Amino acid sequence: MTVTYPLDKLRAEVAFIAYHLHWSLAEILELPHRERVQWVGQVSNINKAILESER
């Protein structure tokens, strides 16, 4: 049995990374799933820290 990652979640991750890091689609899709999710988390943490510092 092959388990696939939901396409809507993959698209959201790709869009998020592309928007914030300006990486190409090919670069993002070459990342293993786990690493891609870690990048999303790191960028999210940076965004949260910026927003909190502006309060």
Image (tube, grey):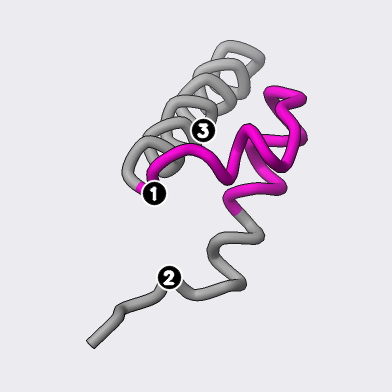
Residue furthest to the left? 1
Q: Is residue 35 left or right of residue 8?
A: left
Dot 2 amino acid type: Tyr
State yes or no: discs 1 and 2 in contact (Cβ < 8 Å): yes
- Which residue is pictured at 56% across the width and 60% down the height? 10
How far apart, in angstroms, are the residues tagged by discs 3 and 1?
17 Å
The residue wearing badge 1 is 33
Q: Nearer the viewer, mark 3 or mark 2?
A: 2
Question: Which x, y percent locates residue 52?
Answer: 54, 21
Q: Callout 1, which amino acid? A: His
Task: Kindly identify the amino acid type of the residue bearing the numbered disc 3.
Answer: Ser
Is-magenta flag for residue 18? yes
Give the image location of residue 46, x and y in percent: 52, 20
Q: Which numbered circle lies on residue 44? A: 3
Mark nearer the N terminus (3 vs 2): 2
Depth-wise, is mark 3 or mark 1 nearer the camera? 1
- Indicate the secondary structure of the residue bearing disc 1: helix
Residue 50 coordinates in the image, percent (x, y) = 60, 16
Is 43 on the left-hand or right-hand side of 55? left
Q: Residue furthest bottom?
A: 1
The Cα–Cα distance between marks 3 and 2, rounded to whole angstroms, is 20 Å
In the depicted view, which residue is nearer to us: 24 or 14? 24
Task: Decide if residue 4 is on the left or right side of residue 47.
Answer: left
Q: Is residue 24 magenta?
A: yes
**Residue bearing mark 2:** 5
Q: Where 7 falls versus 2 (above or below)?
A: above
> Which is more N-terminal, label 2 or label 1?
2
Report the number of discs. 3
**Considering the image in quadrants, where does the N terminus appear?**
bottom left
| Residue at figure coordinates x 63%, y 57% from the top left | 12
